[in-house]
Image (spheres, helix red, strand yellow):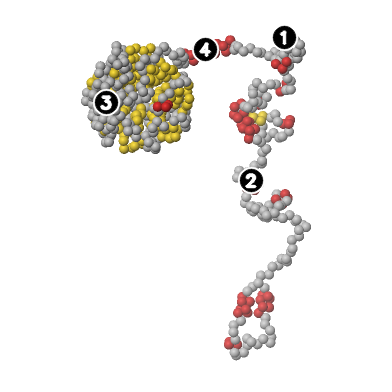
Amino acid sequence: MASVAALREYGSSDDDSGSGEDSHLNPINTTELINQKLIVPVTAAPDVLPNEELDPLRHVDPSSKELLYNPKAEELFAPTLGPDCPFKTGQQRAHRNTVAGFVEPAHLSEFQFEAQRKTFTSFGYALDPTVGLAQNEGSSYVGDIESAESSSGRTVFENPNRPDPSRAGVKRKIEKNDDSADLEGYKGPWAPYENESRSAKPSEADKEELDAYLAKMKKRGKPRYEEKAIEEKTSLHIDDPVDYQGRNFLHAPHDIGINLRSDAPPNKCFIPKKQIHAWAGHNKGVAQIRWFPKTAHLLLSCSMDGRVKIWEVYKDRRCVRTYFGHRQAVRDISFNNSGEKFLSAAYDRYIKLWDTETGQVISRFTNKKVPYCVKFNPEEDKQHLFVAGMADKKIVCWDTRTGEAVQEYDRHLGAVNTITFVDENRRFVSTSDDKSLRVWEWDIPVDMKYIADPTMHSMPAVTLAPNLKWLGCQSMDNKIVIYSALNRFKLNRKKTFKGHMVAGYACGLDFSPEMSYVISGDADGKVFVWDWKTTRVLARWKAHQAVCSSVLWHPHETSKIASAGWDGLIKFWD
């Protein structure tokens, strides 16, 4: 290396630029200074070209993730070249493709694996997974080998009563007789197998077990309803069913000082102060009361004793007629527009159409389900149609002319409690035990509006306001909530009437004719009166000894209210 440096420092003999007195004036040669300080390393190994004949493989970097050419198998699986780390253990040096080691692919379907796993869990044995693919090695088992051999290696998915494999391919013999001339013995394609048992009767032990089970179920089962309708009866309780002009009791009186045929409501209503009459005649609680349409000079009531009665509201206030035609309690009643007919729905699963004057039954309707509410279509041209809310979550429309169901509205998730017609009788609103309110277009069995909220409760009593703008709903959380009866059916949150206790009972409610007051019954037998504008309780009084099930404000009187209770009484207040 010293000789190389000396050669670099060697200069030409005739180059005298660096000598003399004026040498300090010459410019500095930077190249010479750099060369003096540089030491060029010399590689002792000669340049050697790679000999492809000795190693024709293209080596692959083990850390590479992508190859831009198609390598041969020898190149792809060649051993890793280069020095090995002497500090690795034998486990670390081992070839592996997972963290735990090297996993070889196993050609086993998921079903076969699950079958063997479940068989081992249930029976205690499974096929040995280390056995090769040869046929003679496929009968080795692990676990309970004795059970495996006794059951012939049956898995959990195989029938224990499978046929013997040794009899595979052996078919049962058929008693053939294809001779069509033999009329008695001809069997044709319907010939039975030999020794085939065709006994359809259970064995003696099975018969005893079945009889015991049927007797137990019959004892536990509910008694079935009577298929045959009861014979209807009626009783007239007055001696003068017609007046001197031949008019029956359906004709409204003129001599009581009030125009009962007026469509205008009273100008101002007042809260009743005292009881003026009590109608007694029902042996059990009164479920529902209804005014006679338009005039309200008669009062129709239905009771849990299975009877329907009609009462006079004015003059002597007598019981005019009793209609008896149901085996069980009557749930609801409904007049048609003229009042000449009415419907009664009872727990005996029958809906009956009565003639109000004569007490004769015109038609009977049933679909073998309990009707909870019934209502005539208020349109004059649809008076032959009525709808009934049933216990099987359906609303059924019947035609009184044919006696057949013509439409079903099946969208509710619980028993239907009320049906109320709104929007000029083009729609009706139904409430149900599913805590929802649904709005239907007439004769379209899909609800046009569905109102449900987690905070809502069941509403077993609904009344349309006299101005046809609001729906009053008796909610089971001891409230009366008000919904708009117009397009949106929106809840009016400012109109919520509280203070009474009705949870668990279908207590009716009503409005005063000029919309000043809201009245409702109570589970304690009280009658509550609220102010419509302020929603404050204005009055309450004890009306009945049991639940006050229904209250009605007279549409032509300023302060007359009828209330009915489970004590069997109907009271008139003024």
The residue lying toward the viewer, choosing from 567 and 197, is: 567
Please identify the quadrant where the C terminus is shown: top left
Q: Which tag, 2 or 1, sits closer to the chain's start? A: 2
The image quadrant of residue 427 is top left
Badge 3 crowding class, 10 Å Cα cut-off, few under 14, some 14 to 19, many 20 or more, is some
Q: Secondary structure at mark 3?
A: loop
Which residue is label 1 attached to? 184
Q: Is residue 63 above or below residue 197?
A: below
Of labels 4 and 1, the one closer to you: 1
Q: Residue flagged by tag 4: what amino acid is it?
A: Ala
Q: Secondary structure at mark 1?
A: loop
Which residue is label 4 attached to? 212
Badge 4 crowding class, 10 Å Cα cut-off, few under 14, some 14 to 19, many 20 or more, is few
Report, in whole angstroms, how far the alpha carbon at label 4 lies from the one at label 1. 42 Å
Q: Residue flagged by tag 2: what amino acid is it?
A: Asn
The image's mark for residue 518 is none
Report, in whole angstroms, how far the alpha carbon at label 3 lies from the one at label 1. 91 Å
Q: Residue flagged by tag 3: what amino acid is it?
A: Asn
Q: Secondary structure at mark 4?
A: helix
Which residue is label 2 attached to? 97
Q: Are marks 3 and 2 in contact (CB under 8 Å)?
A: no
Q: Which tag, 3 or 1, sits closer to the chain's start? A: 1
| Percent x, y of residue 143 | 63, 29
Which residue is label 3 attached to? 259
Of labels 3 and 4, the one closer to you: 3
| Percent x, y of residue 5 | 66, 76
Q: Which tag, 3 or 2, sits closer to the chain's start? A: 2
Report, in whole angstroms, how far the alpha carbon at label 3 lies from the one at label 2. 101 Å
The image quadrant of residue 328 is top left
Q: Which tag, 2 or 4, sits closer to the chain's start? A: 2
Q: Residue furthest left?
A: 273
Q: Is residue 322 left or right of residue 156?
A: left
